Structure formats: C-alpha cells, structure tokens
Amino acid sequence: MIKAYTAHSKGAPLQLSEYDPGQLGMEEVEIDVAYCGLCHSDLSIWKNDWGISQYPLIPGHEVVGTVAHIGDSVKQLKPGQKVGLGWFSGSCMTCPNCMSGEHNLCPEANQTIIGRQGGFADRVRAKAEWVIPLPDSLDFAKAGPLFCGGITVFNPFVINGIRPTDRIGVVGIGGLGHLALQFARAWGCEVTAFSSSANKESEALELGAHQFVASRDAKAIEAIANTLDFILVTINVPLDWEPFLSGLRAKGRLHFVGAQPELSAPFFPLLAGQKSISASPLGSPATMAKMLEFCARHKIAPVVEEMPMSQINKAFERLEQGRPRYRIVLKNDF
C-alpha cells in the first residue's frame, strides 16, 4: 500500500489515506519520495481551475527520491539511484514526436497528477523514460522544483537557440522567473528583469539580472525600446503586451511559459519588425537531463521554503496567498 495526501473533491482539504497501486508495470519505476515541490499547477489542479482534474486527487509533480523498484524491462535505472520526476509520467514512445525525441509533445502523454496518483506520498510510479537521474552535486532538498519550474524556463533557451550574445528580458520574478534569471545569466546573456514589484529589484540583481525595469512604469519600458532579442514571460496574468513588443529588436520573440488565460497583442509591430509570439510546455527527458547538468555546473538552485509534508494544507494556503519565496518543498515525514 502507498500512503498519500488525497483531496476527495474540488478544493477539499488533503487527508492522509492509502491506496493499492497494483502490480508494477514492466516499463515502470517506483520511487521512494524524499521531497516533493509544491507548484502553482498543483493549486490549479486541486481547485480544478482548468476543468481537467479527477478526484480523488493526489497532487505533487516535482518529486525527488530514490528508485525503490523497477519493472522487468527497465535497463537504464537501478534501485537506490537518486532520481526526479516532473509533470509528465509517461509517453507513447511510438508517435512522431516521441520518435524524434520530443516526448513532451506526445499527444498521448500522461500527466503525473491527471488521472494518476501524484507525489505527495511516500512512493510514486512513472514510466522509466520520465524518471531522470540526478547529478550527485545537486542539493537533494532543493532539486524538486527543477522538474517543473526549472525545465519550463530552461526549455525556451534550447528550442529558441538563445545565444550568449543575446539580450534577454524576464517578465515576473517569482517561482519561474527567479530560475529564468539564473539560467539567462549563466547562459552568458545580458539580462533585464521586469517586475510590478519595485521592492524585488535588489533580489533580481542578486539572482542574475543586469538591470531592473518596473513593468508598471511606462517611461521605464519605453527606455528599453528596440534593445532586447528575446523576452520570456513567466507570469500568468494578462498585461498590455504592446510595450514589450516595442522593447524587442527586429526578429525578436515574445515567449510565454506562464499559463495565460487569454492573449491579445497588436499585429502591426509583429509585421513591421518581423517579430513573433510563441509559447512552450516543459521539455523532453533529454532536455531535462541537460538542465540538471547545467544547474550542477553553474550551481543553480531554486530558492525554497522547506516544510514537512504533514503540513501540506498549510503549504497550499501559503501558496494560494502568494507568500512563498520562491518555491515550497515538502519533505516526506510519513
């Protein structure tokens, strides 16, 4: 039996329960959970904000732990190995996207907390292709958020061919943005941080930004017109995007990873400057492995608040109130 924290209906308090996972599949891995990050997506699924939740629900998709058991067909992992698991827990392995190494674009991909039991538990299962080994030098207690927040902001650097000579803007200095600043600086880019909170300037500079722009200050945004090659938007609230498009150079790109409820932008700045707007989900297993190596090499880690998993409801409350700095990680204390 697996012990887990379960919500039995939309937004209901999570209660300690048990379930029988059945026989381990031939291509599956069972992980002993050590830590699991609390992501805003967990909050959205718990409250069914996206209309895709299934109850009873066990959230948690930023897992780090050790391999407990492997299926008979699993060759690349071994019991006792330190690993992590993120948003995806399986892919079909036969579609054109999977066969080209873009498993994250698989139309049949399984999400760890949609119709499955997630990581706020003592153990969790997933297909082996999505269970990623951890470099030894990464801090075990802080690595969980890299498997969702980290890969979400790392993947755009890879798929958009960002160069060290590029000038990069990051909109939002929160759970995603504080990692994006670290990645951009380590990538070698000149980094501009945008935030509606002027009091985040000193932290943004410490995290890697070269300059800070108050996103509600129209004159400050006007001052950076035609200077940036790429702007990464990590927030999930709509803004007036026209000033940000004006901040891009010709052929620049405004790229979204925050889950926007809707998107509206003027057309002619795109046409005149051959600019583009794009978005991306999390990265492939191979890209996740590269991200972990990059973090180990450059000593990049999320800023976290650690709480015991038994305080999971208090953790959800803190997240809903926007109080964490910048990510919450729950330690298994079963």
Image (tube, grey):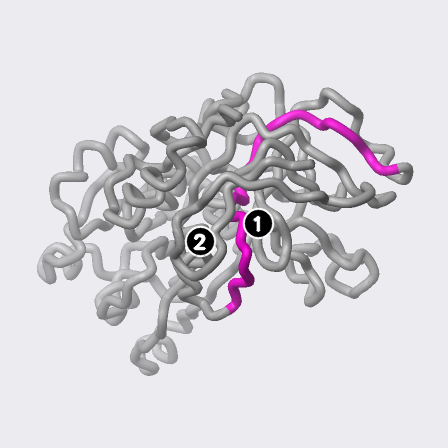
* Nearer the observer, 103 or 47: 47
Label 2–label 1 contact, CB within 8 A: yes
* Nearer the observer, 209 or 262: 262
- Does residue 1 appear in this view? yes
- Does residue 229 appear in this view? no
Q: Earlier in the sequence, mark 2 or mark 1?
A: 2
* 296 versus 98 height, above or below: above
At 22% from the left and 33% from the top, the residue drawn is 203
Q: Is residue 176 magenta?
A: no
* 133 versus 316 height, above or below: above
Q: Which mark is residue 87?
A: 1
Residue at numbered disc 2: 41
Q: Which residues are magenta?
A: 52-71
Element class at badge 2: helix
At 69% from the left and 41% from the top, the residue drawn is 125
Tell me the crowding category of disc 2: few under 14, some 14 to 19, or many 20 or more residues within 10 angstroms, Cα based: many
Q: Is residue 58 magenta?
A: yes
At 47% from the left and 51% from the top, the residue drawn is 7
* 56 versus 153 height, above or below: below
Q: Position of residue 264 (x, y in %)?
A: 32, 77
Q: Amino acid at mark 2?
A: Ser
Q: Position of residue 302 (x, y in %)?
A: 40, 32
* Nearer the observer, 121 or 299: 121
User: Which image quadrant for residue 73?
Assistant: top right
